[in-house]
Amino acid sequence: MRKDQIDRRTVLAGTTALGAAALLPARARAQTAAVSSPAGSLPAQGEFVVRGAHVLSMDDSIGDFASGDVHVKNGEIVGIGASVHAPGAEVIDGKGTICMPGFVDTHWHHWTSCLRPAMRADNPKRTYFPTTFALGIHYTPEDSFRSVRLGLAEALSAGVTTTHNWAHNVRSPAHADAEIRAMRETGIRGRFAYGNPLGAPNDQPMDLADLARMKRDLAKDPMLTLGICSRNVDGNIGGTRGAIGPEMAKKEWGAARDLGLPITLHTSGLGAVKVLDGAGLLGPDLQLVHPLNTSAEDREALARHGVSYSTSPVGEARRPGDIQFIEMMQAGVRMSLSIDHITTYDCDCFACMRMLYTLNLHRTGGKFKLTTKRLVQLATIDGARDLGLDEKTGSLTPGKRADLILVRTGAPNLALIGDPYDALVQLAMPANVDTVVVDGRILRRKGAFTTLDYEKVAREALQSVEALKAKAKWT
């Protein structure tokens, strides 16, 4: 029997110790003159109840409700069930919607978002890597702020409520501050992964002193956490993103681990996992990105050491080698879903789930059991676990923070649906995301931003890319 067919009593929970006052986003420190945009105002948290939605909780102890309610107060989920008593709460009509946790992205280079206009799919000199390197070395803190803010706006519009900001072009402490400020002002939850600037010498470590400063700055931020994104560690010293050997990795990763910070790393090439395992660098605090070109021995080592893997299926489909999502799952490696970037494709978690479902059918003929519900878990609660945020987000559980979306089912592409998980994976698209709530703040409603001035966000991002093109003599 399906869980959403069971007539269960309402599940309620009291308020946790994380009160509303403690969850107001921290103010960014004073920026350099380069980052001059005024701080935005976020919606109040307040109290509301979503009524009559098809609720997908992503919590096995709660299950789903074909018609259910979700009660939110002061940023926290305080009740979920077939009928929740919430006197005085604002009512959001959930009829004709799927109410579910927001998507959790686990790897996204937000700093590249504004570079779309400079790229051409049919010109090898204007594709992603040459463009981001040629223009990335000219970024000011203001450019970083505007580009990250543009990416976060698209993330929210597509139903992403948590993101892993993979910042592998931190050109100065002011650039790091600018990216953090963009995350705070848009109201998204996430991790900031501090990285080296493009073009930095491979024999020099990242700015470890500033990393420690950022750790202090974010220590009490309820919405943001900190990690590092490492240069490639595959025995090859070179490349536009930077590449280091095991000794430099031990120095940088050791400093990060001393600070209690997680580490993330691209590994789409050959031999990286073997190098990391041989150097004793694998561990449960490590997230690898792009599951391509690994061996069975690699995957066994990853599972043994508790390493997680983030897959970005749209981008990975453009690279040589099979997307080894299935092999990772079979080996017991923890998996999550990510966007990567939005310069040559858009943010679409539905398409990512759909692609993985299709790849499984293509490569195994369906012999590997992969349900549509499992894919929605991958895009929500599994992502939260990967980022160490599953006690706060990833499921609609009383006591967790209220990060949720409403997906409207009446549009032509999503009408007459049967199973809601099938509908999300097989049919849905970002345009179906009606309402987006992060930490109890309604950031989008009826398909529109509630406070964010998107026209300004897009206009200023375009100004930045035009200035960058001019500096790089990019015609």
Image (cartoon, grey):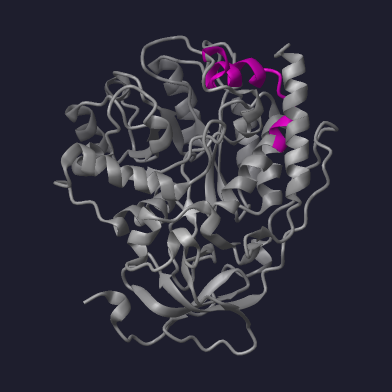
Q: Most prominent secondary structure in the magenta stretch?
A: helix
| x and y percentages locating residue 179 in the rendered image | 67, 38
Q: Quadrant of the N terminus?
A: bottom left
Q: Which one is in front, 320 or 171?
A: 320
In the drawing, does residue 107 fall left or right of residue 120? left
Task: State the residue at coordinates (59%, 21%).
Answer: 132
Which contiguous range is marked in magenta? Answer: 124-146
| x and y percentages locating residue 403 in the rendered image | 53, 62
Please tell me whether residue 140 belongs to the stretch shown in magenta.
yes
Residue 312 visible to the viewer:
no
Q: Quadrant of the C terminus?
A: top right
| x and y percentages locating residue 421 in the rendered image | 35, 62
| 455 lies above or below 222 | above
Task: State the residue at coordinates (78%, 23%).
Answer: 467
Q: How many marks?
A: 0
Residue 102 visible to the viewer:
yes
